[in-house]
Image (cartoon, grey):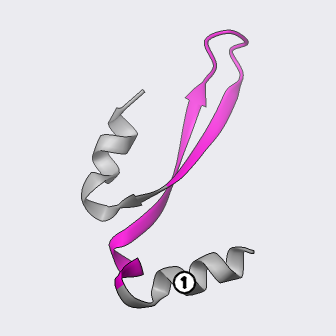
């Protein structure tokens, strides 16, 4: 599955997007979760700054 995602992102306008992984701490348990999204290159800092 990962190969297909990478292959599709390399063609056409897929180079304008980046997969961003952010570590978020759960307020209830205190454990860390990873939040993954494919974000446009212009909005990476906004995604990382948001809670």
Residue 6, compared with residue 32, is above or below; it is below
The residue that disc 1 covers is 8
Residue 45 pos. (x, y %)? 30, 47
Magenta segment includes 27 = yes
Residue 35: which quarter of the image? top right
Q: Residue at x 34, y 62 (%)?
A: 40
Q: Is residue 50 left or right of residue 9?
A: left
Q: Residue at x 68, y 9 (%)?
A: 28
Residue 6, compared with residue 26, is above or below; it is below
Residue 49 pos. (x, y %)? 33, 35
Q: Which residues are magenta?
A: 13-37
Q: Residue at x 38, y 89 (%)?
A: 12
Callout 1: SS: helix
Magenta segment includes 14 = yes
Q: Residue at x 73, y 12 (%)?
A: 29
Where, quadrant-wise, is the N terminus in this rendering? bottom right
């Amino acid at each position: 599955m990962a190969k297909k995602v990478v292959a599709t992102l390399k063609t056409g306008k897929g180079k304008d997007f980046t997969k961003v992984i952010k570590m978020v701490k759960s307020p209830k348990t205190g454990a860390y979760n990873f939040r993954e999204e494919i974000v446009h290159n212009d909005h990476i800092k906004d995604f990382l700054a948001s809670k």
